[in-house]
Every structure is written in structure tokens, then in C-alpha cells.
């Protein structure tokens, strides 16, 4: 006799994203331990626990391949002023932030993600102008501990900041060199990298450098130092087997990263706008992935050529680049944004198709992270990371064309139930293992303290000109067809 499953989920639709891209109507999913034990229709196995509500739509757990730890507590700071935003991030992340700050932000981000169906996420330990808080392990330790509390799978990207070194950290701006930040990154990897077990992983990160940094008129003197840092990073990745990621690729930087020995199938590169032919060729040769961030400010300043990259055989996934300054962790929003972004460019309402948008947040993202054998689709033997949408809502009705409904009409608030590693973390929109009120209160108090510490409480006040301000250098409007 077959032993009963631990959990049985009955669904109106099961969107598997398996190799055959099956969509199973009136189906079920059986979970035993942390794995999917069966998927089918008709008679189902017995189970200790059953979830069965009308209209549920099952998806693989969504994967956010690029975001920033810390950003959840600096939302909207600077009120649209990009320079102010970077200054605020640098001041908080490098100087004011305590381990408690990173823990509070991880809890808040984890709560938002779980409520939105994100089960795996990559977070850079800082950001702004490449400020990564690896002067000591304390920030990374705090983030990982808080992330494990949420139950979310997280990969924390750690590494050195941008030239010049040493960098100043803490209220006293104590100097920290490149070698020390690399030591901390290796230490964090050794103690926390277990994303499929304990739920936390560690990736390595190095700032993006552009070909211009090698021109005599710019930073030719730093060229040798950049090469030495790249060699040290490549060596650390080879020793650890860690994922390597970068934030802000554009205009020749990917070809340069290949030349520096940084690219492989274990590399996932953020943004990728205004790419050159040499950049695309580098991606094809090395097997590195691109993380498209369609809702990010960088995607306004330049275009990531996603459909062209996919046609060229490059793996592309989606990241939120969240949770600030003007976007959150709702991957349904980012799927829809990606489709509109490229459809407007091509003036073609079918490029990319709905299924590809979902793939970029599931199996393609898992592939970019090197986790496609365990995550990214609903298949027997894979980890039981499952999201159930409440399909019985007016904006998701009538119950036809499930891919269309999920990618165009669903949003984070439609997530009913979330299972991570076989554990039900959200059910009927209740998160019983976390105190949501306490998380919100802690986040508010910590954010208030940080802005006070850097002397910028004004940075979170909206300016009256947000109603009228327009910054454009375009010529006056002329109706279509006029000279």
C-alpha cells in the first residue's frame, strides 16, 4: 500500500512549466517531505492534510533573480531625485546601518515576497553606488538569520565595493580594503551557503566596470587593479562554486567581463541594456545569463534586448530590482511590465508571449541560478515550492486561458497559499509563522532611525512639484503626420 502523502493540493488548474509545458485542469499535487511526490488528475493519494478550495491555480514558486537587501527600508527616498537617492543609500548602507537594520529589512522583504508568491530571491547586500556591507560578517549574518525566520529561500550576493580602496565603513568611516571584503565574502559562503537545505545561499558580486575605465582619459591607472580584482574573484568562485552576479551591465561591459575571466554558466548579469554585438557573443560563448529588470530605472535609460537575446540562445530571467525606490517585489507586475516593454518596442502584441514571461520568473530564473534541477517547475522529485492563486476573483474571471490570466491580470494580492520546501507558509492569505504587525512596526522604527542618523528625515517628504514636474528636452509636440 502506498503511504499517504503529507499534503494534497487540489486545483482548478496546474501550470507545471515542465518540459512539456503541461497545464492540467482539475488536477492535484501530492507532497511528501520537501518534495513533490505526484501530479495528476482523477483519483488522488491519501494525505495527512488537504488544501481544496474552488478556483485555485497552482504555479511553481516565483523566483526573483535580482534585488537589493536594504532597499525595503529606503523606499521612495529622494522623491525622484536620482543623485539624492544614491547619496542616501551610500550613507545608510556604509555608515549608519547596524546588523539590526539588515535583519529588519530582510523580515519586511521576506513578508512582502511570501505574500506575493515569491519563494526564492537573490538579494545584493546593499547597492546604490555599489556599496556592499562586507567590512565584517555581521550584516550578512543578520540578513541570513532573519531570512531563515521567514522561510523564504534567499541567495545573498556579497563581495567588494567599487574602486578606489580602501572604503570607509561605520560611523567612524574606518578604512576597509578589497582583500578584507573578499575574506568576509568567503567566510559568509562557508557558513551560510545551503539554499536547498536551510534556505540561505551565498553568491559573489563584483562591481561592473566599463571599457571606458581603460581609456587614457579616464582611469587607465586602475586597469591593472581591476584585472587583479577580477582574477581574485574568479579564483574565489572557482574555489567555492558560488554563483557570480553583477549589477548594471551595459554597452560593452559584458565583453569586458568575459575578457576579465568572470563569465561562465554560473554567472547571472543584471540589467544588460544597450548591449553591443560583442556583448551578445560573449554571452553565447560563456553561457552566462541575463537578468532583465523591466521595472527598473535603468530600463528607462536603455533597453535590454530580451527577445533578441532569447533568439540568440541566451538564457534570460526577470528580477524585481526592488524594493525601492519606485517598485516592489510583485513579480506579476514585472511579468506584465516585461511584455509591454518589448511589445511597445516591436509594435507586436505577441512578443514575448505569455508563457515566456512566466518562464522567466520560474524555470529560466532557476537555470540562471544553477537550480533548475530542484526548482522552477512543478515536477515529481523537485522541491515542493508551490504558489496557489485564488482564481475566483472578478479580474481573473471567467476561468479560461490560464496563462493569459496569470501574466496579464493577476497580482500579488491574488496569492492565496504558498508552500516552500514542503512547508505551508501562507494559507488563505494568513502567515501564521510570522508576526506581520511586529515586522511592520520594527521596519518603520528602523527606517526612522536610519534617516535621522544620516540627518535626512526630509528625504521622505513628497514635494509639491510631483504633481506638475516634467523634465523633458524633447521638441514641442506635433500631431502625427505633420512635418
Image (cartoon, grey):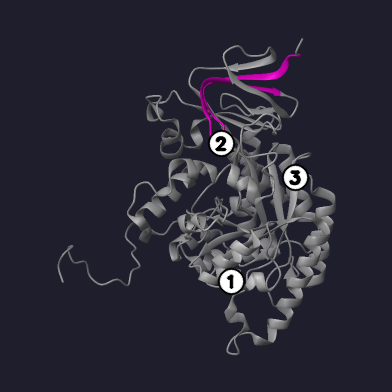
Q: Is residue 223 above or below residue 183?
A: below
Q: Residue at x 65, y 86 (%)?
A: 220
Give the secondary structure at mark 1.
helix
Crowdedness near tag 2: few (<14), some (14–19) or many (≥20) residues, C-alpha within 10 Å: many
Q: Residue at x 64, y 58 (%)?
A: 287
Which mark is in front, 3 or 2?
Answer: 2
Q: Residue at x 37, y 46 (%)?
A: 350
Which quadrant: the N terminus? top right
Which mark is in front, 1 or 2?
Answer: 2
For marks 1 and 2, the one nearer the N-term is 2
Crowdedness near tag 1: few (<14), some (14–19) or many (≥20) residues, C-alpha within 10 Å: many
Instruction: Return the residue at label 3.
Output: 200
Instruction: Return the residue at label 2.
Output: 17
In this view of the protein, can residue 454 be seen by the observer?
A: no
Chief secondary structure of the magenta portion? strand
Q: Residue at x 52, y 43 (%)?
A: 331
Q: Position of residue 444 (x, y in %)?
A: 60, 46
Q: Give the Cα separation between the discs numbered 1 and 2.
A: 33 Å
Q: Give the Cα separation between the discs numbered 3 and 2.
A: 24 Å
Magenta residues span: 3-31
| Residues at marks 3 and 2 touching, judged by CB atoms closer than 8 Å | no
Q: Is residue 367 above or below residue 209?
A: above
Amino acid at each position: 500500500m502506498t503511504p499517504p502523502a503529507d499534503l494534497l493540493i487540489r486545483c482548478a488548474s496546474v501550470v507545471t512549466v515542465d518540459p512539456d509545458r503541461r497545464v492540467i485542469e482539475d488536477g492535484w499535487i501530492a507532497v511528501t517531505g520537501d518534495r513533490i511526490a505526484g501530479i495528476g488528475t482523477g483519483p488522488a493519494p491519501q494525505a495527512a492534510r488537504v488544501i481544496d478550495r474552488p478556483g485555485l491555480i497552482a504555479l511553481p514558486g516565483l523566483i526573483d533573480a535580482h534585488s537589493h537587501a536594504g532597499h525595503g527600508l529606503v523606499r521612495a527616498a529622494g522623491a525622484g531625485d536620482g543623485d539624492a537617492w544614491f547619496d542616501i543609500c551610500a550613507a545608510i548602507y556604509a555608515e549608519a546601518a547596524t546588523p539590526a537594520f539588515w535583519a529588519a529589512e530582510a523580515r519586511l522583504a521576506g513578508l512582502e515576497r511570501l505574500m506575493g508568491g515569491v519563494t526564492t530571491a537573490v538579494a545584493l547586500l546593499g547597492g546604490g553606488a555599489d556599496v556592499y556591507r562586507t567590512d565584517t560578517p555581521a550584516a550578512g549574518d543578520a540578513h541570513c538569520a532573519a531570512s531563515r525566520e521567514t522561510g523564504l529561500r534567499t541567495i545573498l550576493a556579497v563581495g567588494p565595493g567599487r574602486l578606489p580602496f580602501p572604503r570607509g565603513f561605520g560611523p567612524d568611516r574606518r578604512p576597509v580594503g578589497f582583500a578584507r571584503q573578499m575574506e568576509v565574502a568567503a567566510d559568509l559562503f562557508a557558513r551560510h551557503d545551503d539554499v536547498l537545505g536551510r534556505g540561505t545561499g551565498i553568491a559573489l558580486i563584483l562591481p561592473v566596470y566599463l571599457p571606458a575605465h581603460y581609456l587614457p582619459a579616464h582611469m587607465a591607472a586602475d586597469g591593472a587593479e581591476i584585472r587583479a580584482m577580477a582574477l581574485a574573484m574568479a579564483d574565489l568562485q572557482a574555489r567555492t562554486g558560488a554563483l557570480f552576479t553583477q549589477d548594471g551591465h551595459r554597452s560593452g561591459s559584458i565583453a569586458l567581463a568575459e575578457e576579465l575571466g568572470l563569465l561562465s554558466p554560473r554567472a547571472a548579469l543584471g540589467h544588460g541594456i544597450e548591449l553591443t554585438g560583442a556583448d551578445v557573443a560573449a554571452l553565447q560563448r560563456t553561457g552566462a545569463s541575463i537578468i532583465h529588470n523591466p521595472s527598473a530605472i535603468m530600463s528607462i535609460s536603455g533597453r535590454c534586448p530580451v527577445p533578441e537575446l532569447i533568439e540568440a540562445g541566451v538564457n534570460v530571467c526577470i528580477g524585481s530590482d526592488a524594493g525601492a525606490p519606485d517598485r516592489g517585489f510583485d513579480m506579476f507586475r514585472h511579468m506584465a511590465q516585461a511584455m509591454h516593454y518589448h511589445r511597445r518596442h516591436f509594435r507586436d502584441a505577441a512578443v514575448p508571449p505569455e508563457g515566456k514571461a512566466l518562464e522567466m520568473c520560474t524555470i529560466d530564473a532557476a537555470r540562471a541560478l544553477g537550480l533548475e534541477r530542484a526548482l522552477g517547475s512543478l515536477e515529481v522529485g523537485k522541491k515542493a515550492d508551490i504558489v496557489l492563486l485564488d482564481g475566483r476573483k472578478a479580474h481573473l474571471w471567467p476561468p479560461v486561458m490560464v496563462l493569459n490570466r496569470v501574466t496579464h491580470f493577476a497580482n500579488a494580492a491574488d496569492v492565496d497559499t504558498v508552500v516552500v520546501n514542503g512547508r505551508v507558509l501562507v494559507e488563505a492569505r494568513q502567515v501564521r509563522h510570522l508576526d506581520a504587525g511586529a515586522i511592520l512596526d520594527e521596519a518603520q522604527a528602523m527606517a526612522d532611525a536610519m534617516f535621522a542618523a544620516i540627518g535626512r528625515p526630509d528625504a521622505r517628504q513628497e514635494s509639491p512639484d510631483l504633481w506638475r514636474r516634467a523634465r523633458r528636452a524633447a521638441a514641442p509636440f506635433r500631431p502625427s503626420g505633420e512635418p
